Image (cartoon, helix red, strand yellow):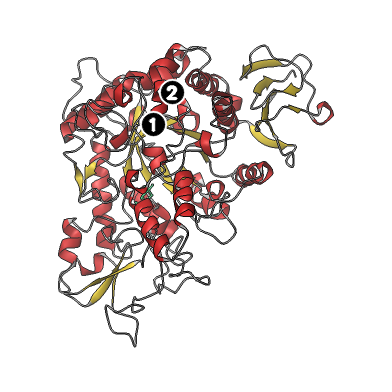
Amino acid sequence: MTSSPSRSLASDHVDQAPDQAPDQAPDQAPDPAANRPADWWRSAVVYQIYPRSFCDSNGDGIGDIPGITSRLDYLIDLGVDVLWLSPVYRSPMDDNGYDISDYQDVDPLFGTLEDLDALIAGCHERGLRLVMDLVVNHTSDEHPWFVESRDPSSPKRDWYWWRPARPGHEPGTPGAEPNNWGAAFSGPAWHFDETSGEYYLHLFSPKQPDLNWENPEVRQAVYAMMRWWVDRGVDGFRMDVINFISKDVTLPDGPQGPGQPHGSAFPGSANGPRLDEFLAEMNREVGLSDQHLLTVGEMPGSTIEVARRVTDPARDELNMVFTFEHVDLDVAPGGLKWDLADLPLPVLKRNLESWQVGLADVGWNSLYWNNHDQPRAVSRFGDDSDEHRVHSAKTLATVLHLHRGTPYVYQGEELGMTNAGFDEIGHYRDIESVNYHAAALVLGIDPETVLRSLAVKSRDNARTPMQWDDTAYGGFTTGEPWLPVNPNHKTINAVAAQADPRSVFAHYQSLIELRHTHPVVVDGRFELLLPDHEQLWVITRTLGRDRLLVLANCSSYAVAAPSDELPPLDGAEVLLATHPGSTGLDLAPWESRIYALKN
Ligand code: NOJ
């Protein structure tokens, strides 16, 4: 298959004047709404770039915007429709840019606003759209809003969650925090400010204070900033932990297990009573639906019911959400993400099925295995041994892309990149991993166990540099990379994959093209067959007279598919297979096929 159909699909929505300079000023930009048909995102495939780790153009060891622009033709070759750019805003980089100190500037590490304009133009020239990360549950503590807010008499004091110590406790002493919530990056979710004698809330690091969305001035400031980006030409927003913007304003203590140093910030910190109101207001004030902008809300702890509500098109809130349920299944009951547990295939299948069913008539799913916060899919859900890596990466992709929803591909997933699995703490850079290591040792958890958890679950697994070629540092940089390059870049790299018609990359190209050419992939009704089978993942998709069957062996062992429990395969055409030419129902390890069934 070639990638041309996706280009023609994409090019019909980019209507740029031929004489328009790529770095034109935003006030001369074409009317962006006119270039985006309604619901265009339903048939799109999104590619996520984590700028720090994608491509370094200036040899400082850190990826940057000109590096991304230099690789746009790679994305065109893959066939994706949208680039989601993780944060490039000005930031002290406590959480690699998810702590923003200026929403309307680019951090010098990544380049300049002009570089970003050139990237947007470069995308649009090629029929690609660009979606920005929007991080507005919190700012950096170095954002001028928070700096001002530190003064109790400032009009911005109420822009953040400042609270006195728990009644009866001496401010600043252990246990005096306003409630028992733990922060996502270890420690309490409250930081004591000696000057004012009060605490501020930070659900992540102390350098990421939570904005108070109850204050209408905060909301209007965020909307104005979003309009500024829309005017600059962006095609939508991926909204960081957006369900945290409405909290239970009584800030109640959360459940606290025995031996746990802090209570859970759930349910009080998320999915609060004003979530729908805030999202609808944002949509209206920024013109998100009116301008056909893509909106995807990252929503940890949200249920199908919440997702169905916020993605109901009649409510004009969001297009889709990132659920966390399927990436929280390999965790021991009641434990944290670090408490590893096996994940039986039926549990995973059933979970994805429940979202398919829940959002079948109203709303829309996003589909992902990977992002910058998750370990590599092939290491986690597949088999990254030399023997099975390629087939398991392809089969996982097939299964995911044949669910109903918009698929997200995270950089390097299309190469079958694997976990780094560092074995010493000195290699880790991620704040969550480094803090967890320190906190776990204080709690007396065995150091080997801690390192094992990090090797399996650390976010740094996703953040090792993109593997472009087999040269030193994988072609990512000419300098010293900020995080080690995985030594397997010698064999797993883009140059090798693009030259190999049997590569994981070629398989992703075919899957993306299938979506662009077969409406049943986009809109077909979903059904899960053999839900309790321990090895097989079997799906049908039906649209009118078109019916697809996905038959996938999600295990490292051969399996015979039970013909009497499958639809008849007589006359069926194989649209895509991991083992071309293989027929019959004896499937090799990680073998999968997509059939177009005969009517
Ligand atoms: C979710 C982002 O994906 C993650 O990388 C970040 O650390 C937190 N939100 C805080 O912004």
Disc 2 on helix, strand or loop? Answer: loop
The answer to whether residue 81 of the structure is visible from this angle is no
Q: Residue at x 52, y 12 (%)?
A: 1
User: Is disc 2's CB within 8 Å of ligand 1?
Assistant: no
Q: Residues within 10 Å of mark 1 (few under 14, many from 20)?
A: many
For residue 237, above or below residue 82 = below
**What's the mark number on residue 486?**
1
**SS at badge 1:** loop
Kindly identify which residue carries mark 2.
Answer: 492
Does 222 appear above or below 479? below
Mark 2 / mark 1, whichever is N-terminal: 1
From the viewer's side, name the closer residue of 223 and 466: 466
The outermost residue toward the right is 564
Mark 2 touches mark 1? (CB < 8 Å): yes
Residue at mark 1: C-beta within 8 A of ligand 1: no
Q: As rendered, which of 196 and 554 lies closer to the eye? A: 554
Residue 415 horizontal/vertical position (percent): 45, 25
Number of marks in the image?
2
